[in-house]
């Protein structure tokens, strides 16, 4: 059965904002108001349509993004409820990539918080249409005028009040649509509607010369015309309507739905970009309902009953359940068989979806977030890869190990499934420390991952802060000799090796030189000498960490016709290397990271002082909008392993940072001595045992 609506009838909206700003309660209320559900869900008692995972019900906040839908004034509205805590930012970012509009929820009693700013910046970057919803207008300690002032100061004068509240706090009883006539104004409006009207109209006409002239000439512009002009201003990014509501008391919901139906962006009004797989060009995709099929995966889940589900935003063309799809990353093809529209956990099968629609398909192997899919045999767009969704790099590492040894083989499979769903979660086996290291956005994020492993895969793990991957090297040349001689009855062991070692440039690795003359060590034993040195490189000498950037030259030695062997020369070479290394000014190298921290201006001094205690060097700083400051620095990785928690506590959760590897640099002598002493002590313990 074909769809009964067209691309112009679709509105895609992400509900975004900081945690506890009321997004999920708002989603439940909108569904109920529009008649999309027969009962109103409730976050507190675990009946929300949106919070479907056990972990979300247990914690009373959203962890994943959830798809919902409703119909209002002839518009097909796809809502995506997104998580509000920065710990789960990845799920919010993938949702923003699938929509044209955001409703940024700001709790009227809490105001602008750290994730409010972050999500706003991402939405602006993607050129999405925006609307700010002041939720919880019925809460205590609400000051509408002060909050509106802070919003305009933080996000700019384009944020203007389309609604004015009647009363505020516990006395909040209704809203006035300022574009419509407002002759009888209740006494308890904190802002007069005519003042709000002036702000709205001046912002709308600012980029429309014809309307500006009429307005300056004193003409009253009809509401219908203002709404059309407001829609154009939202497309241009010069207008963000501010509305106010109470989801729990059903105030302002219908008015907000009317406004969204009238002025939010339709799918054809925002063009996505990509490039052809065989070219570097930037390609702008026109979203045509009857164009060639182009869709992008923005979310995946691993459902216990349905298996893997991939969520597609269709940007062009049509998709039916018998369309043969091609994954342009892998070239693999398959038919979806079934298309699903989701209402939280509930799945409704549809036969067809068009450009602008959001649907889920099951059992299509190897689809990952950001993959572009098309129909087999597409023409011009058949090799168009849409720009990948951008995610932050996870910065909080933890080493993991199973509580029971028999679970070890299963852990990687479980982590792989979770990493497939969550691009801000990674795992790797550290070749140097041999630890399995997981990385996430925060300790809370990793705690949720740990619970998922247990709930889904019955896997229990222990975690600890991972070892820092130090390296060892030398700063000076040295020479040594070791004679390995054992006689234990029968054939003995004999090898005599003379080595010179010298430092190499950073990153040049290891080089072995055979400088033996006159056969003092026979050719057949030279590989054993090199192997003995290489094995010692892996084990390290002063701290148990690998040795890098060293050249070893074997230049003299001796052998015994009967007692010499490969094993004897390996042993002698390793011992000779250790002796030479100890006198070659050995140093430890530590990983250094570049970090950029964004903090409220008043916390700037605390952050810079803290960085100096971490051996950090500040390399730059910038002033950011909304009273924030950015600090760039280089810091040893060893000082940053718990930084996410420390920054949260120093800034009350309002700071954020990004971090990436920069280089390896020598450890200061006092720090090196502590590490070497610790290692020697641990070795002594092992040897005593």
Image: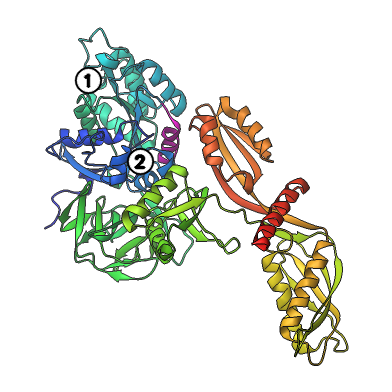
Position of the C terminus, as image quadrant, is: bottom right
Could you give the CA–CA distance between mark 1 and mark 2, rounded to whole angstroms? 34 Å
Q: Residues within 10 Å of mark 2 (few under 14, many from 20)?
A: many
Q: Residue 138: which disc?
A: none
Q: Residue at left 20%, top 55%? A: 340
Position of the N terminus, as image quadrant, is: bottom left
Residue 63 sits in which quadrant?
Answer: top left
Q: Residue at left 25%, top 13%? A: 171
Which range of residues does the magenta coloring cover? Answer: 112-123
* Magenta span includes 124: no
Residue behind mark 1: 180
Residue 414 sits in which quadrant?
Answer: bottom left
Q: Residue at left 36%, top 24%? A: 160
Asked if residue 126 can be seen in this view, the reply is: no
Q: Give whichever of 324, 598 is nearer the camera.
A: 598
In the image, taking residue 116 as reference, residue 537 lies left or right, namely right
Circles 1 and 2 in contact, beta carbons < 8 Å: no
- Furthest residue toward front: 489
Q: Main secondary structure of the magenta part?
A: helix
In the image, taking residue 689 as reference, residue 262 lies left or right, namely left
Residue behind mark 2: 83
Q: Give whichever of 250, 487 is nearer the camera.
A: 487
In the image, taking residue 289 as reference, residue 638 lies left or right, namely right
Residue 456 place in picture, x, y as percent: 32, 55
Q: Disc 1 or disc 2, which is closer to the eye?
A: 2
Residue 253 place in picture, x, y as percent: 21, 28
Q: Disc count in the image?
A: 2
Q: Secondary structure at mark 2?
A: loop
Residue 499 sits in which quadrant?
Answer: bottom right
């Amino acid at each position: 059965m074909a769809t009964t609506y067209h691309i112009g009838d679709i509105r895609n909206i992400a509900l975004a904002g900081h945690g506890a700003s009321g997004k999920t309660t708002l989603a439940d209320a909108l569904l109920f108001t529009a008649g999309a559900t027969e009962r109103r869900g409730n976050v507190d008692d675990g009946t929300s349509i949106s919070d479907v995972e056990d972990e979300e019900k247990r914690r009373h906040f959203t962890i994943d993004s959830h798809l919902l839908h409703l119909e209002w004034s002839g518009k097909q509205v796809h809502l995506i409820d997104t998580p509000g805590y920065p710990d789960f930012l990845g799920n919010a970012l993938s949702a923003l990539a699938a929509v044209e509009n955001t409703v940024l929820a700001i709790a009227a009693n809490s105001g602008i918080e750290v994730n409010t700013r972050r999500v706003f910046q991402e939405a602006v970057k993607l050129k999405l249409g925006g609307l700010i919803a002041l939720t919880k207008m019925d809460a205590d300690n609400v000051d509408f005028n002060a909050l509106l002032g802070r919003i305009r100061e933080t996000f700019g004068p384009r944020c203007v009040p389309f609604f004015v509240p009647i009363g505020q706090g516990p006395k909040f009883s209704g809203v006035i649509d300022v574009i419509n006539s407002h002759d009888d104004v209740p006494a308890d409006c904190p802002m007069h509607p005519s003042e709000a009207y002036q702000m709205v109209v001046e912002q709308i006409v600012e980029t429309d010369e014809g309307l500006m002239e009429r307005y300056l000439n004193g003409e009253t512009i009809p509401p219908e015309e203002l709404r059309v002009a407001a829609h154009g201003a939202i497309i241009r990014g010069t207008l963000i309507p501010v509305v106010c509501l109470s989801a729990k008391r059903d105030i302002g919901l219908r008015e907000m739905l009317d406004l969204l139906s009238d002025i939010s962006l339709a799918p054809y009004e925002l063009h996505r970009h990509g490039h052809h797989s065989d070219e570097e060009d930037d390609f702008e995709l026109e979203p045509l309902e009857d164009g060639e099929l182009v869709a992008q995966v923005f979310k995946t889940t691993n459902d216990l009953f349905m298996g893997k589900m991939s969520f597609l935003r269709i940007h062009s063309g049509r998709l039916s359940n018998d369309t043969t799809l091609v994954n342009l990353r892998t070239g693999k093809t398959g038919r979806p068989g079934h298309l699903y529209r989701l209402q939280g956990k509930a799945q409704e099968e549809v036969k067809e979806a068009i450009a602008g629609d959001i649907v889920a398909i099951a059992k299509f192997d190897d689809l990952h977030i950001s993959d572009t899919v098309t129909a087999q045999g597409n023409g011009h767009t058949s090799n168009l890869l849409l720009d990948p969704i951008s995610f932050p790099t996870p910065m909080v590492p933890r080493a993991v190990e199973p509580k029971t040894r028999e679970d070890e083989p299963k852990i990687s499979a479980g982590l792989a499934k979770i990493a497939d769903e969550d691009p801000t979660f990674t795992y790797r086996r550290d070749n140097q420390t041999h630890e399995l290291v997981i990385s996430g956005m925060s300790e809370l994020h990793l705690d949720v991952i740990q619970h998922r492993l247990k709930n889904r895969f019955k896997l229990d793990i222990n975690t600890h802060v991972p070892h820092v991957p130090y390296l060892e090297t030398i700063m000076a040349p040295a020479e040594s000799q070791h004679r390995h001689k054992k006689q234990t009855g029968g054939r003995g062991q004999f090898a005599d090796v003379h080595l010179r070692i010298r430092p190499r440039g950073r990153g040049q690795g290891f080089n072995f030189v055979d400088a033996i003359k006159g056969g003092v060590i026979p050719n057949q034993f030279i590989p054993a000498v090199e192997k003995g040195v290489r094995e010692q490189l892996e084990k390290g000498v002063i701290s148990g960490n690998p040795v890098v950037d060293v050249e070893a030259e074997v230049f003299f030695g001796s052998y015994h016709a009967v007692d010499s062997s490969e094993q004897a020369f390996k042993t002698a070479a390793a011992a000779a290397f250790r002796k030479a290394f100890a006198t070659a000014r050995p140093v430890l190298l530590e990983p250094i990271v570049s970090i950029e921290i964004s903090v409220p201006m008043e916390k700037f001094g605390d952050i810079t002082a803290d960085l100096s205690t971490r051996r950090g060097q500040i390399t730059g700083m910038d002033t950011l909008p909304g009273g924030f400051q950015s600090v760039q620095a280089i810091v040893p990785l060893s000082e940053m392993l718990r930084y996410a928690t420390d920054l949260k506590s120093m800034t009350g959760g309002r700071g954020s940072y990004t971090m990436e590897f920069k280089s390896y640099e020598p450890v200061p002598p006092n720090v090196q001595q502590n590490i070497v002493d610790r290692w020697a002590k641990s070795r002594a313990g092992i040897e005593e045992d």
